[in-house]
Image (cartoon, rainbow, N blue to C red):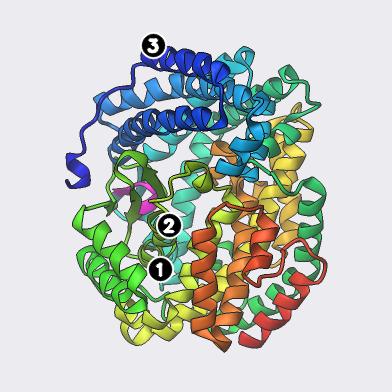
Amino acid sequence: MKFSEFPYERVDIEKAKAFFADLIEKAKAAKRGEELFELHKTKYAYMGDVWTNAKIATFRHSVDTTDEFYTKENDFYDEITPILLDLNSKYEKVLFESPFRSYMEEKIGKVAFKNIELHLKSMDEKILPLMQEENALISKYDALIASAKIPFQGEEYNISLLRKFLTAEDREVRKEAWKALSTYFQSVTADIDDIYDKLVKNRTKQAKELGYDNFVELGYIRMMRNAYGRKEVENFRRQVKESFVPMICKMQEERKKRIGVEELKYYDNDVFFANGNPAPTGTPEEILKAGQEMYRELSPETAEFFDFMMEHELFDVLGRKTKKQGGYMDYLEKYKAPFIFANFNGTSGDVDVITHECGHAFQGYVTRNDEILEHNDLTMETAEIHSMSMEYFTYGWMDKFFGDRSADYLKMHLEDSITFIPYGSMVDEFQHIVYEKPEMTPAERKAVWKDLEKTYRPWLDFDGDPFFDEGGWWQKQGHIFWNPFYYIDYVLASVVAMQFKVWMDKDYKEAWNHYLELCKLSVKDFYEEELKAVGIKSPFADGTIEYLAEELEKKL
């Protein structure tokens, strides 16, 4: 079947409750570890169907946020997902306390049981109404962003389709486009402030209901931080400030000369060449075809993967006005099939979908036949390694997408990736401050962001813009609303991916083989242990960021 032909059936929550009640009773009565494991496999099958239907519904809602049927289905899953998680948590508690725990730990892994411990610390029936409210607030933010209608040069654009003008070669055009974007956000900033204020207070209340001082600790638990904590992340951010920010400040001076401006303004931030950023030369169909050629040449494993994706039409990448913003990869357990959602908009970001999101999908594909589903219960700092590293492993094929500007694309991609490290760290520190002081007003939160900009992005001049210069930038960063404390995972993964970049420049085949090994490891072991197993330095270790900055500065 093609993805569009996959059948959808609404999950029956009463049947789910009955399934788990029966499963829990049988698990408690199990006489042997082997019997418990066989019962556990019935959960794999049942929940595979449940999550597949839920993901199909939310995907079809993302594809067209005005579709009334799937909007209602999306609202339905906002309501029942916390209930499903709570049912699963009750079952996991039985596993955790089972006399056959040691047998199960051998079967599904020590990481799985650490994750179960964290799940149990993050769930309780008493917070279900708050979790449902949280989901509804997130959907409200998504709907607000997706419904943006931004007038520009006589046309109307959503945020994604405006992107090509935000990076236009003509400086006046991009200045005007950024002004249009700023005007839109200024018009809805009070609504976004209200949504976020409610989210912060909601999550804080969840944390206190579970016995935590604030949401920071619960946020780490919800992100499945099973091998490191706040201290390690703070040390990482310190190294970024010391080693990456000074390097990037020098890089900005060089970029200023390259694009031919006397002063860098915020509307120059995403522009890397005087003649504009390189854009893909083909249609969306041609980009997908070039991607297929690239992956067929890269390795036998990537060839099989991409052919599978194309055969079953597991991409929805065309930008449309009623489509949810952003891009993501997810996985349909029932069909053992990854799928990719994105918004092509005529910029280099279209190619990043073919590299980044396909890195996620490739890892899901190569491990799809693992009987132990917990092995693919990826924490995000690991999952993002697969995607960000693939961006570098595909460097040698960029001429297929950018023609004679492929070298420009590679320079832009590397500089942009390096510049992202402080930005992602700033997003993380902002959230720590916000959730430590949930009583802050919206104005105080914006003041915090504005102050952090001076530390992490001192080169950025917002030119008195009434929205961005007053600390509003974070409101367009969806991760802050969707998944608190997720964003640092991109940064940690990027540091690992950059190590693969340094490695592949010395020995491509050796670096690829270790990357493939990491993909297959999935989460059979804890984060730093897996990095060590494939020859990569931990981002948390003192000296890693300094070493990487030195290596990257040579390449720049």
Residue closer to the observer: 288 or 303: 303
Classify mark 2: helix, strand or loop.
Answer: helix
> Which range of residues does the magenta coloring cover?
156-161
Classify mark 1: helix, strand or loop.
Answer: loop
Query: Mark 2 highlights which residue?
Result: 177
Asked whether residue 267 is in view, the answer is no
At label 1, which amino acid type do we have?
Answer: Ala
Rendered location of residue 285, percent (x, y): 20, 64
Sequence-earlier tag: 1 or 2: 1
Asked whether residue 81 is in view, the answer is yes
Rendered location of residue 474, percent (x, y): 60, 46
At label 3, which amino acid type do we have?
Answer: Glu
Residue visible at 67% across and 24% down? Answer: 97
Residue 311 image-quadrant placement: bottom left
- Would you say 519 lies left or right of 335 here? right
Residue visible at 68% across and 73% down? Answer: 248
Quarter the C terminus occupies:
bottom right
Sequence-earlier tag: 3 or 2: 3
Query: Mark 3 highlights which residue?
Result: 14
Residue closer to the observer: 456 or 86: 86
Instruction: Count neighbours of disc 2 (C-alpha within 10 A) and say few if under 14, some if 14 to 19, many if 20 or more.
Output: many
Query: Could you give the CA–CA distance between mark 1 and mark 2, rounded to whole angstroms?
Result: 9 Å
Verify CB contact (< 8 Å) between mark 1 and mark 2.
yes
